[in-house]
Amino acid sequence: MLKKFINIVIMTLCIIMSSSLSYSASMLTYDKALELALKNDNNIKVYQEILNYYINQDKSQISNPLNSAKDYEYILGEEIEKPLNIGEFDYKKAISDASYQKKILELSIESETLDYFKKLILLQDDIRNLESEGEIKFKQLNIIKSKYALGMVTKNEYEFQKNSYDSIISNIEDKKRSWNLIMDEFKSFLNIKYTPVLSEDNISELITIDKQSLVVPQEAIDFAKKNKKSIVDLEKDLQDYREDLERYSRIYPEGTYYYEVKKEEIEKKFEEAEDTLTKQLYAFEKTYLNLMYSIDTLSKIDLEINKKVHEINYYKTLFENGQISTIDYLSKKQEIENLKKDKKEKLYEIKSDILNYRSMINQ
Amino acid sequence: MKNKMSFYKIVLSVMILIVSVGDISFSQGTAITYDVAVKLALQNNYQVKKVTQEIDDLDIKLTSSTPISTGPIITMPSLSSQLTQSSLKLSNAHQAKKLEFEAVIDGLELQLKNSFYQIDYLNKSIAFKEKKINLALDKLINTDTKYRFGVASKYEAEQGTYDLKKEKEELVNLKLSLEKERNNLRQLLGLKNFDGEIVPIKTEYIPTNKLELNPEFQTAKAIANSAAIFYQQKTIEEAELNRVLAHWEFYSAANTPAQFSLTPIPVRDSEIKLKDIELKNQKESLGFRVRETYNTLKALETAINQLENQKQKLLKDYDALKVTFAVGMATGLDIKSLEMGLEEIDFNLEKLKADHTMLRMQYEKPHLIMGR
């Protein structure tokens, strides 16, 4: 008997644990979604394979003295390290290229995850708001229906109310259809079979966006010079031009015609590079200022919400005193939900702009 | 062989079309019908000419190249393998171009229809906007009179001026959009100097529940007819063949330094995997886009139903207003405003139905829907 009881207790515990586990597994926050996307993306896996191969090959090339021996050339008695032989595979460059490709892919996955998450959460909110609106409309419809039966309103008014209720129901169906489609795309993107429940637990992390944590454009340029491939390549090209000119000067000393022509040509390249950097700085400034503006708009929405909260309190008192109807009170409450949705939308927009800004600096 | 036959059939039908439209002539300023526009576009459109030329070029190249060997690849000498590769590439490009040609023709018809709808809509919008300007002017005179007699505020009078200005600005924008659309039509027709009018086409509004085409079936159809997917499949086949050839060359030829410049075999394998992933994504994405088109069609139907309901209500309001007007309790301006409202709903309905028709045509020929 006791054994049977223990068995039942164990089984119950197992059921509770498994249900809580499956619950936590199906709950999906933005961070968790990003983690899954990066872990399950097939392209990233293949890029990692390529990268591993190049790293291993590079290691074995270094360990092989025949391959790792450096070659030198002598110009005017000076010993200069020669570039790689033609036809020799440059694993270092291949590693750098593959890492860059992987980084770009990761950045794009991050912004795509945010995009899906944003669309789904906002659609969910839309559906929820429409459902609340539908409830109010349904109550209104019942009132009108009774009034119509008593001959207090015209058939036209009743039909109008009925149509507006029907159109909300159709809108909900349309939104649900879109949600299902985007969710299927998201599942395929995350490489998962189950339908997760989206959680906004980490939404507060998105909210804590402050102006101070953003890199100012000048700092962004300094960072880009070290990390952004196009800018790094540009800097490398400039360094090569400097070395070219230095090598050139050994054959055609400074002051000679050929040296001056070459110098002029290189100076032009420097001007072009300067121009590119200035344009880049402007682009960073533009994005940065847009972000600042969006953050300010977010504060304005916060103020609007606070104002609405006070208004709702006022209407609540009116409602409790029986001065306004339930429907009027619910409609007022609905307005605050719409504002909250606006705030959330802005929040995701800012987060997405920050990701773009980061991508601009990095790639 | 079968493919070649179907291609010739297409070429033949295009030629028949060209012959049949040989006598097409239109004088400047006369209106053209949609059917004539399609014939003119097939004759003159740059994109059609370009793809036809590309197919002809590929035909010539294919007939002059070595036929594809069916023997074992591993034993082929290097030169022969290169020739096989290029013949295979040419043959794949030829088939992909044929699919592209079909898509260009279908797409062109679709774009022409869209252009006809747009021009018609913009023409109607301009006429409607002009009426609205007249109404705004009437209202302004009315408010101005009231203001002068001290019955309306200065703000109301100023608001009237502002409304009139806004309507006039919108009219300018509509005219610009019309000019832009007419340029687009000129481009589609391949006639730079075309200045004629169009004969509006009627929208064929068929709700999705009467179509009996489910998204799954349409997705399969889209995948089977997509040039991009066909090309990707062939690219994978080429990459696999190249991988085998590279393997063979690497081990058979002397290990000269030049051999090291080739992409290493494991990297080639990974690249094939990447292409496979891309193909899978392309197919999946096309399926999602087909479903998206279906959802948009449904959403458009909801919007059409809503507008139709609104129209019914306005019609009843209009009847009531006419009675009120007859007994002298409503103004002529009230009647005019309601009539304008009804007219606006009518052409908004027409626009939604045109959008629905365009989207339905894409849904019926799903290879025209582009995957992301």
Image (cartoon, coloured by chain):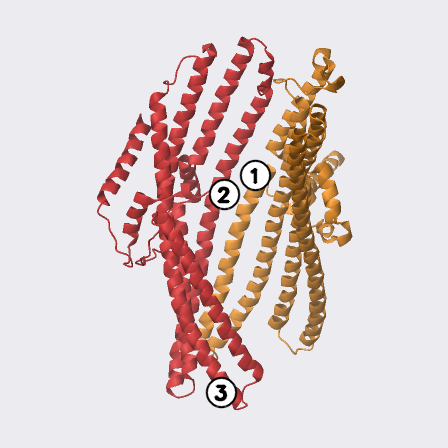
Check the image and name the residue furthest to the bottom.
B149
Is the C-beta separation of discs 2 and 1 under 8 Å?
Answer: yes
Location of mark 1 (residue) = A188
Same-chain status of marks 3 and 1: no
Label 3 vs label 2, nearer the camera: 3
Q: Which residue is painted at 40% across and 88% down in the image? A: B328
Is the C-beta separation of discs 3 and 1 under 8 Å?
Answer: no
Whether residue A121 is visible: yes
Q: Is residue A273 left or right of residue B218?
A: right
Q: Chain of mark 3?
A: B
Circle 2: element type? helix
Closer-to-camera residue (B78/A31): B78
Q: Is residue A198 left or right of residue B19?
A: right
**Chain coloured red:** B
Instruction: Determine which of the numbered discs, if any, sits on residue B145 in the image.
Output: 3
Q: CA gap, disc 3 to disc 2?
A: 59 Å
Q: Which residue is painted at 67% across and 74% down in the image? A: A319
Q: Quadrant of the N terminus of chain B?
A: top left
Location of mark 2 (residue) = B288
